[in-house]
């Protein structure tokens, strides 16, 4: 049963943030309400299922305070349902769990399910208000960011030529991402992707072909970035990517996959093959101490330019040029080896060649038996046998 909501006083501007209290103990609910009623609006429910229904219907709820042991739907199940919701305002709502000091296992489980904070029964007013204030501040920031994104999206920030978001949107979104990263101590990376010798493509073919090449790369980039990333064309043959929650090492891994993909992609125009390579510069707000999107993209562009000056088809970040060929176990390594050989980089396969040969030996043996081919299987086995 929902409690009445206190009205705001005349000196308050706008409605007070609303807190949903879910606990099967009327005394616990009354105690929390007594602490917060001067600072926050509230609703109260006696079980998790009722709390969930309230959360679905009441869009004004900023924070949920929930017990763990409740009838119908306990706190763990409520938390799991909240974090799995397809509705962003519900999925992102801060959830403060009421627990006892002895509940270490329960806290660990709730943390794994996405609990934002914990309070104990009998908590003091000052501490409780501080916890709720922190959660409300986080909730407001998320709502403001979502509203800002919606406002920008409603203006159709798409470049008609590339089909990608405009550079203006990239900068606007990037500043929001950096602001959130500073508040929550997250990392953000920027990549500047430049087509090597792009002017030569235009000179050898035509401007129309050069535009087709850029549109092709734009489609590849759009299909490879994550949902939360933004990519925009920022110049002739140049694209910038803002990647939130991506450290510099992950950015290097992504850049290497992209570089390899393009190096092994051939485009055809009127019977002529066009092969491309990329120079990619990477910057990171933490690793490079960058505070603005312009700083990050400018630094990434400098590094991409240095890559191009050194011959192109390479990557650079604050850690230098990442290892191009970090081999992982599994059949994917065989596929990657074939791609590198076809791209004219057989030397990169040599370190892993014995392991690859050991993997394909059963296949060679089967082929020899099936097609009656005289293969030097034993010689291959000796050659690639692990050294003792």
Image: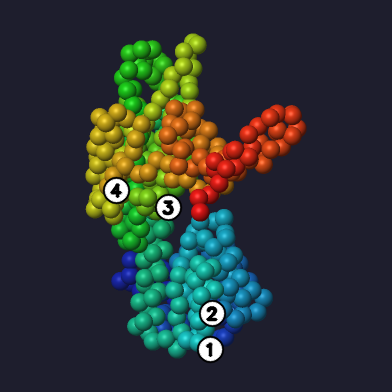
Residue 105, labelled with which disc? 2
Q: Residue at x 41, y 58 (%)?
A: 142
Q: Residues within 10 Å of mark 2 (few under 14, many from 20)?
A: few
- Mark 1 Cα within 10 Å, few/some/many (few <14, many 20+)? few
Q: Position of residue 13 (x, y in %)?
A: 33, 66
Q: Are marks 3 and 4 in contact (CB under 8 Å)?
A: no
- Seen at 61% across and 70% down, the residue is 77
Please state, as top left, top right, bottom left or bottom right, where the N terminus lies in the image: bottom right
Closer to the camera: disc 1 or disc 4?
4
Q: CA distance from mark 2 to mark 3?
A: 34 Å
Q: Earlier in the sequence, mark 3 or mark 4?
A: 3
- Alpha carbons under labels 3 and 1: distance apart: 36 Å
> SS of the residue at dot 1?
helix
What is the distance, in whole Å, between disc 2 and disc 4 at their CAs?
40 Å
Few, some or many residues within 10 Å of mark 3 (<14, 14–19, 20+): some
Q: Nearer the viewer, mark 1 or mark 2?
A: 2
| Residue placed under numbered mark 3 in the picture | 146
Q: Residue at x 66, y 36 (%)?
A: 364
The number of discs equals 4
Q: Earlier in the sequence, mark 2 or mark 3?
A: 2
Callout 3: SS:
helix
Q: Nearer the viewer, mark 2 or mark 4?
A: 4
| Secondary structure type for disc 4 | loop
Hey, which quadrant is residue 70 in on the image? bottom right
**Residue at image mark 1:** 27
Residue annotated with mark 4? 319
Q: How is the image coloured?
A: rainbow
Which label's residue is closer to the chain start, 1 or 4? 1
């Amino acid at each position: 049963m929902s409690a009445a909501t206190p009205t705001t006083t005349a000196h308050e501007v706008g409605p007070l943030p609303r807190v949903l209290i879910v606990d099967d103990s009327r005394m616990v609910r009354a105690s929390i309400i007594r602490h917060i009623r001067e600072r926050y609006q509230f609703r109260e429910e006696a079980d998790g299922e009722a709390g969930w229904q309230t959360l679905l219907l009441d869009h004004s709820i900023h924070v949920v305070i929930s017990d763990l042991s409740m009838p119908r739907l306990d706190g763990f199940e409520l938390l799991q349902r909240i974090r799995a919701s397809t509705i962003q305002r519900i999925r992102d709502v801060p959830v403060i769990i009421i627990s006892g000091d002895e509940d270490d296992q329960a806290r660990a489980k709730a943390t794994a399910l996405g609990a934002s904070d914990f309070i104990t029964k009998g908590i003091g007013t000052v501490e409780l208000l501080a916890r709720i204030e922190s959660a409300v501040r986080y909730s407001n920031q998320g709502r403001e960011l979502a509203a800002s994104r919606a406002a920008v999206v409603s203006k159709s920030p798409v470049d008609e030529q590339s089909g990608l978001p405009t550079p203006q949107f990239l900068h606007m979104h990037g500043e929001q991402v950096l602001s959130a990263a500073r508040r929550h101590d997250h990392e953000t990376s920027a990549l500047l992707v430049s087509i090597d010798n792009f002017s030569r493509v235009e000179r050898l073919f035509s401007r129309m072909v050069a535009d087709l090449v850029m549109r092709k790369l734009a489609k590849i980039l759009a299909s490879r970035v994550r949902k939360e990333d933004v990519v925009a064309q920022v110049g002739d043959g140049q694209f910038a990517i803002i990647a939130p929650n991506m450290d510099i090492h992950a950015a290097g891994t992504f850049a290497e996959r992209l570089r390899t993909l393009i190096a092994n992609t051939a485009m055809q125009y009127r019977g002529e093959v066009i092969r491309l390579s990329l120079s990619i510069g990477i910057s990171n707000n933490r690793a490079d101490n960058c505070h603005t999107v312009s700083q990050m993209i400018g630094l990434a562009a400098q590094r991409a330019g240095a890559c191009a000056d050194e011959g192109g088809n390479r990557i650079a970040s604050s850690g230098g040029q990442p290892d191009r060929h970090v081999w992982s176990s599994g059949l994917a390594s065989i596929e990657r080896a074939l791609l590198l050989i076809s791209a004219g980089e057989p030397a990169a396969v040599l370190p892993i060649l014995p392991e690859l040969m050991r993997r394909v030996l059963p296949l060679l043996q089967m082929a020899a038996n099936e097609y009656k081919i005289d293969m030097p299987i034993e010689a291959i086995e000796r050659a690639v046998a692990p050294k003792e």
